Image (cartoon, helix red, strand yellow):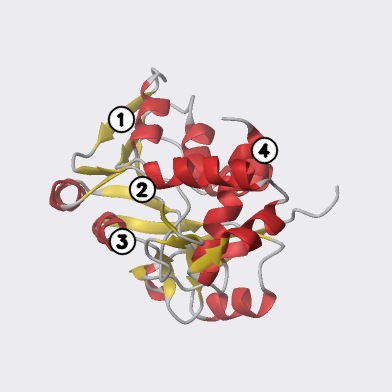
Amino acid sequence: MSNRRTDRMRHVLSLLRDRGEVGSAVLCAELGVSVATLRRDLAELEEQGLLVRTHGGARALDPSGSEIPVRLRDHRMLAIKRRIAQHAAALIPAGPHAVALTGGITTGEVARALRGRPHITVVTNSLTIAADCAVDAHMKVIATGGLVRGNTLEAVGPMSEHAFQVITVGTAVLGADGMSAEIGATTFDEAEARTAIAMAANAQRVIVAVDGSKIGKVTLAKMVSPRQIHHLVTDSTADRQQVDGIAAAGVHVHVVDVGED
């Protein structure tokens, strides 16, 4: 799939997430495409179970809390996420250490930053992170079982939760869809949240690694409250008032500068 088409599909899903239902004429105008092109995009998105086509356009399956699938997410922020991840990885002590990771682009970059370190054990419910780490001879990789969500390629459910309940790790690194001073780290999916709760409960310390766009947002399902978080790593685009509030709650906040060098 071309980058241009991926961008269009992501834009469609974002519009539906914000508005619930959008007409074809509005979608064509927003995307700058023909009716035929829009029809093909909507048909593919419907086939993937990401929206419902209506007589006059399309509507979201779950406008209250749907997320954009990982394969369609905007990877143009990768450089920022990588810098956040590298800072988070630097907080993990040298020597034998077990690290639990939720799925996501930023946590995947944390895993990559840890590659080559001796005596690192990675425990994850993310199929992509497990596969990425398994090729590194230095790493011991434990992948949890469970039901795999197509949007995020994460295993969730009782099997995954039980795995984290019986494994104690030194550090849990959580990605999130929202991070606020009032609520803490949240995600769109309740099952993913339950898995993250189990992961964090058996970790000696918790790091939340999110880009600045997530700061101040609250999504459907809570993972950890601010008092459960030891470190937050974000970037300088984050809302300053929220960052200060999170720090006031006792979280050690690390802000990575993403301004021009």
Residue indicated by mark 3: 193
Could you tell me which quadrant the N terminus lies in?
Answer: top right
* Type of amino acid under label 4: Arg
Q: Which residue is mark 2?
A: 49
**Amino acid identity at mark 1:** Val
Left or right of 63: which side holds 39? right
Q: Mark 1 or mark 2, which is nearer to you?
A: 2
Quick one: label 1 or label 4, which is nearer the N terminus?
4
Residue 89 seen in render: no
Distance from disc 1 to disc 3, alpha carbons, whole Å, reads 22 Å
Mark 1 or mark 3: name the one nearer the start of the chain. 1
Observer-side mark, 3 or 2, equals 2
Residue 205 image point, x, y percent: 37, 58
Q: CA distance from mark 2 to mark 4?
A: 21 Å
* 171 to 114, vertically: above or below: below
Which residue is disc 1 drawn over? 141
Q: Nearer the viewer, mark 3 or mark 4?
A: 4
> Which residue position is annotated with label 4?
4
Q: Name the image quarter holding residue 99.
A: top left
**Quick one: label 1 or label 2, which is nearer the N terminus?**
2
**Mark 3 vs mark 4, CA separation in Å:** 32 Å
Label 3 or label 2, whichever comes before in sequence order: 2
